Every structure is written in structure tokens, then in C-alpha cells.
Image (cartoon, coloured by chain):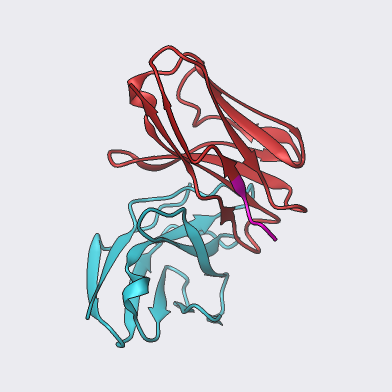
């Protein structure tokens, strides 16, 4: 499984944008970049995914570096409900979703 | 769409007893996954099925654990005999073509073995 590296924790102020980084230097050409989050006492939740181009959805934006060796999940206006563990995961053909330690995001009011 | 449904939500059992966890995936999803989460080890993939067939069970900790998917709408994870170290939250997730979309997770079963 391709490895990703994320900061252990980050802190943000409410109503401000948050940029969550992820390094994946060993990414291969067919690996998709997925982001999930897990709110306290809940199961993981799909956030967004991409292959090469930047992606936007109602929850977040995903910015992918041109060489694909890193990506950034962008929450445009953090709320207290966005406090969670955020996981960056690479998925190769075969569909295995393997979670790392993720980034704990704390949002201050 | 009711989402991925897991039962029971909580299970407390005595060491040595058999435990069966149940999962109903979202209709139309052809992949199903079982995960275990503990504070020490995080989220671990135990097994996954594609079109009801087990594809990878390398994460199943030992022979005490077994999983079945008799049809597209039902899966079980069984622990026999259970041990205190099996205490964890067990999640089931389902999805279509996972790389192109994403998984949907159930709410989990919190298992406590005393």
C-alpha cells in the first residue's frame, strides 16, 4: 500500500479556511487520492477524492500538486462541526482502503 | 437510503462466548469491508468482499475471527471464542467502484468482552 504522511494535529479558528496537507511521494500513476474524516464517536465519512485535477464539492476542495506527490484538503470556512480526524489515503486498483493515523483538526471558537 | 446498517450498536459479552456482528450494505454496492478500531491500533482493515467473494482477509487477526457474505445484502463477522483484547469498535463499510467514488461507513458496533 502506498504511504501518505500527514501532520499529527492542526488547529484552526472558526470561520477561517483550513489547509490540511498530505505527502505521498511514492504515488503511482493510477493511485486515486481520497480523503475521509471521522467525527468523534462516529464512523469515517467520505469527504472528497481526485486523480490529477483539483476537485470541489459541497464539503471541501482538493488541491493536487502537479507532480501528484502531495495534496491539500481545503475547508473554506471551518466550523466547530469540522473538528475531526482527517485521513488522506491512496487507493490503487484492488480497492483496499487502508487508514493511517490521520490529522487531528481542532477548531477554536 | 438508510445507509449501511450495523447491528447491534453495543455488545457486552463474557470471555469465551461467541459474538456475531451484522451488516447490511447499501443496495447496489458490490464491495463490503470490515474494520476494527481501537485507541492503540487505529482503524484496521480486517477483510473485504467484492461481489460477495472474500478478496483479502489478510487483516483478520486469527482463526477466532471469521466473516461471511452469503448474499449481496448481508454480511456477518463472527468471533469465537471472544477474548477481552477483541474489545473495540467494529465498522462495516460498503461502496461501488471504490477508487471512483467512496465508501459509506456504518455507525459501528462497540464490542466489550469482559
Tally the numbered discs. Answer: 0
Q: Residue at x 36, y 72 (%)?
A: A82
Asked whether residue A84 appears in the rendered view, the answer is yes
* Residue in front for this viewpoint, A12 or B74: B74
Q: Position of residue B5 (x, y in %)?
A: 61, 47
Q: Position of residue B29 (x, y in %)?
A: 72, 52
| Chain A shade in the render | cyan
Q: Which residues are the magenta region?
A: B1-5
Q: Position of residue B40 (x, y in %)?
A: 28, 38
Q: Residue at x 33, y 39 (%)?
A: B41
Residue A99 belongs to magenta span: no
| Chain B shade in the render | red
Question: In the figure, B49 relative to B26: above or below?
Answer: above
The C terminus of chain B, quarter of image: top left
Q: Residue at x 39, y 57 (%)?
A: A4
The N terminus of chain B, quarter of image: bottom right
Name the chief secondary structure element in magenta.
loop
Asked whether residue A6 appears in the rendered view, the answer is no
Res. B96 image quadrant: bottom right
Res. B84 image quadrant: top left
Amino acid at each position: 500500500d502506498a504511504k501518505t504522511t500527514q501532520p499529527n494535529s492542526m488547529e484552526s479558528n472558526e470561520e477561517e479556511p483550513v489547509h490540511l496537507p498530505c505527502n505521498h511521494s511514492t504515488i503511482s500513476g493510477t493511485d486515486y487520492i481520497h480523503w475521509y474524516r471521522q467525527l468523534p464517536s462516529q464512523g469515517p465519512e467520505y469527504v472528497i477524492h481526485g486523480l490529477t485535477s483539483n476537485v470541489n464539492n459541497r464539503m471541501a476542495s482538493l488541491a493536487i500538486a502537479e507532480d501528484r506527490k502531495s495534496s491539500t484538503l481545503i475547508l473554506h470556512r471551518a466550523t466547530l462541526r469540522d473538528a475531526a480526524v482527517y485521513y488522506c489515503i491512496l487507493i490503487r486498483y484492488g480497492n483496499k482502503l487502508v487508514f493511517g493515523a490521520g490529522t487531528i483538526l481542532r477548531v477554536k471558537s | 437510503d438508510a445507509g449501511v446498517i450495523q447491528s447491534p450498536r453495543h455488545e457486552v459479552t463474557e470471555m469465551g462466548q461467541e459474538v456475531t456482528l451484522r451488516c447490511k450494505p447499501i443496495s447496489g454496492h458490490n464491495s463490503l469491508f470490515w474494520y476494527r478500531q481501537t485507541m492503540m491500533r487505529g482503524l484496521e482493515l480486517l477483510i473485504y468482499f467484492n461481489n460477495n467473494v472474500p478478496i483479502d482477509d489478510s487483516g483478520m487477526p486469527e482463526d477466532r475471527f471469521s466473516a461471511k457474505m452469503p448474499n449481496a445484502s448481508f454480511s456477518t463477522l463472527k468471533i469465537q471464542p471472544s477474548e477481552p483484547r477483541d474489545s473495540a469498535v467494529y465498522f462495516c463499510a460498503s461502496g461501488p467502484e471504490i477508487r471512483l467514488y467512496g465508501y459509506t461507513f456504518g455507525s459501528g458496533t462497540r464490542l466489550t468482552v469482559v
